[in-house]
Amino acid sequence: MTTPAPTTAARGATPSAAASGGEGGSFFGFSAYEWMVARRYLGATKAGKFSLITIIAYVAISLAVMTLIVVMSVMQGFRLTLLDQLLGTNGHAFLQSDEPIGDYDAITANVEAIPGVVRATPLIELPIYASAYGETGALVRGVRRKDILATPHLSGPDSVVSGSFDTFGVGRKGGDEIAIGSRVANALGVRAGDSVTLLTARGSETAFGRSPRQKSYRVGAIYHVGNAEYDSLYIFMPLEQAQLFFKYGDATQQIEIKVDDPIAVKRYRDAIGQAAPGFYLLDWQQKFQSYFSALGVERFIMRLILFLIIVVASLNIVSGLVMLVRNKTPDIAVMRTMGATQGAVLRIFFLSGALIGVAGTITGVVLGIAFVLNVDAIETALSWAFRTDLFPAETYLLDGVPAKLEWAEVASVAGFSLATSFLTTLFPARRAAGLDPVVALRNS
């Protein structure tokens, strides 16, 4: 039996070097000899180039890591943007009653005296039918002037696209100005200064029931929140006019409360209940519970699915190393006869697979971060290339693709990818270390 000559992976290594783990120092617990052989084994073809299976494993891990970072960042951005818009335009808790609330000034004063309560707003919210050059259904929200001016999501300079709130609520019975969403304005075909007719079923009592009531109002401001639901649904009216229009007298429908820490809104419930007894208290977490619960479940399931994609991508390393071990069986036998230990062989093949996982993970993280930071430009370019709106606001409620890069999420994705790559590498590496050199040389 003729012993095969050492390949280029083992040339220059003395038996003592192989047995002792290498020469020239060590890096991360691996000798320089092991690093050299592992790097050369990544170029498993005769030409010394990377094999196709190595390239596939590297690309698969990179794409899986990038996809997970992008998807989780977009879902988190979607959640945080919606939460910001909901809490910025809505109250955080609501006092409600089966009957109109009469002494709302005293109630709001008691509630606003609670530490942590920012504002208590008397509110009337009822559906109407609006018409001008077009027609649409909408919800009228009757609010006080001071309350809407204290809501920058509606009356701030970044939100007002036409007109202004300067004269909103000014005049007899609050005046005759209203503020409408940008999509409501488009549906009606109006601009600031135009007239809009509102129709409600809450008119005067007759022998045959309530008769419809209609009145024309001037559009004082057009706002744009960036949420398609709000921009296409809500019309804001001075509270005094809402009381007159909907026949509420000197009462209101509910009281909206804002606190300084909306995430911990439940800790204010007892104090609000004591300040305003006899009312039903509903907080925003209860009101939108099903909505945000669905988002949370969807995010968990999506994370689980994409983690499984990383696992599948890492399995390419196993198939590549199994083929590598089979092709390098004579080399393993030569290294073992030269004095390399089983541990040295295991570390060499572990490094070969781990380097693919590390390189793929780093590339995926870089690509994922770059994609998230430029997601708006990418979405615009793709929409232009395909001549279609890839992110319609009517479907996703938002004007653009929201993305929130969380470094803890990125770190967990990278850590999971590396751990999976290392674990899947152990099986073929142990198989290579367990080869009997005599049997390997006999069968080569």
Image: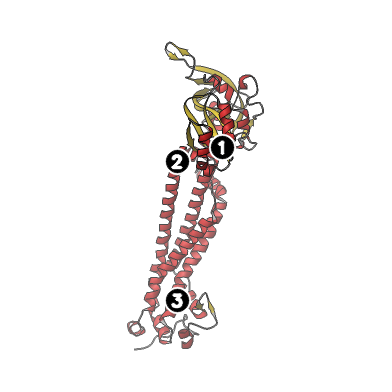
Q: Which residue is mark 2?
A: 289
The image's mark for residue 258 is: 1
Point out the image quarter for the N terminus. Answer: bottom left
* Residue 431 at least partly seen: yes
Mark before the other along the chain sequence, 1 or 2: 1
What percent of the width, then of the height, locates residue 29? 50, 76
Which label number is shown at residue 347? Answer: 3
Q: Residue at position x 42%, y 47% from top?
A: 297
Q: Which mark is residue 207?
A: none
Q: In the rendered structure, which amino acid carries the disc numbered 1?
A: Lys
Q: Position of residue 198 (x, y in %)?
A: 53, 21
- From the top left corner, tell me how far across and down residue 138 is, in percent: 50, 27
- Residue furthest to the front in view is 274
Can residue 44 be seen at all in this image of the molecule?
no
State the CA–CA distance, disc 3 to disc 1. 60 Å
Q: Residue furthest top?
A: 207
Report the front residue among 337 and 108: 108
